[in-house]
Amino acid sequence: MKKLTRSILIRKFLHILTAIIPISYIFLNRFSLVLSLGILGISAVIIDLLRLKVDSIGNFFSLHFGKLFWEREKHTLTGATHYVVSAFLSIYLFEKWIAIAVLLFLSLGDTAAHLIGVKWGRISFNSEKTIEGSVACLVICIGISILLPHPSIIVLISGSIVASLIEFLPLGIDDNLTLPLVAGVAMEILTKI
């Protein structure tokens, strides 16, 4: 189990700051946000690949940002890159309020899951993820759902449950990518029923 080190707290603070993207979507048009995130996403993937393949670039990132990387990110794309790609895909693929919901679930719910899970989590199943952390994620996601005007509360609560399950399950894929996309697909399907 990880400890709440200064590096992890900085990382989680930055994760909370990503809520600016869905909040800005309330006020900005879809095209400008998709375009911006598309450019940012492509840039993030290229920079990450260069970091992994070019030693001098990798050494630069290691020296300046190495403490913020999870161990697995030293050999794969970072969570930040996964986040930007999932934000782009969420806004591109989903109805506006579903995209806003799932990106807030990720920014705030996933952060709560980690912080609560590390600090107070005791029950886990073959993973670093804990039941307590996932319950914290669910509570935050439901709180977000109550505040959003669309879609229906049933769809939002269902999305909250799916997001919390995806956060908990050790799928082997970064949950910065899977959480919003799986929850968003579930919510889109429910709105069509």
Image (cartoon, rainbow, N blue to C red):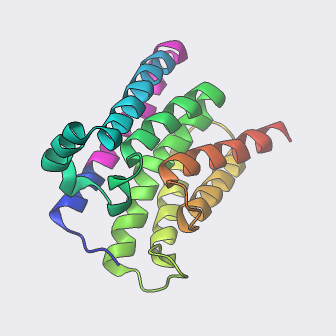
Which secondary structure is most common in the magenta stretch? Answer: helix
Q: Position of residue 34 (x, y in %)?
A: 51, 20
- Tell me the quarter of the image containing the C terminus: top right
Above or below, 35 relative to 121: above
* Residue at the image position 28 percent from the left and 55 percent from the top: 69
In the depicted view, which residue is nearer to us: 14 or 175? 175
* Residue at the image position 31 percent from the left and 76 percent from the top: 119
Is residue 183 at least partly visible in the picture? Answer: yes
User: Is 165 included in the stretch rendered in magenta?
Assistant: no
In the depicted view, which residue is nearer to us: 32 or 53? 53
* Residue at the image position 48 percent from the left and 85 percent from the top: 123
Above or below, 192 relative to 24: below
In the depicted view, which residue is nearer to us: 7 or 113? 7
Above or below, 28 relative to 97: above
Q: Position of residue 33 (x, y in %)?
A: 46, 20
- Tell me the quarter of the image containing the N terminus: bottom left
Marks counted in the figure total 0
Based on the displayed image, in which of its 4 quarters is residue 191 positioned? top right
User: Is 27 included in the stretch rendered in magenta?
Assistant: yes
Q: Position of residue 131 (x, y in %)?
A: 51, 77
Above or below, 168 relative to 156: below
Q: Residue furthest right?
A: 193
Whether residue 69 sits left or right of residue 43 in the image: it is: left
Is residue 24 at least partly visible in the picture? Answer: no
* Residue at the image position 65 percent from the left and 57 percent from the top: 162
Q: Which residues are magenta?
A: 14-32
Q: Residue furthest bottom?
A: 122
In the depicted view, which residue is nearer to us: 73 or 14? 73
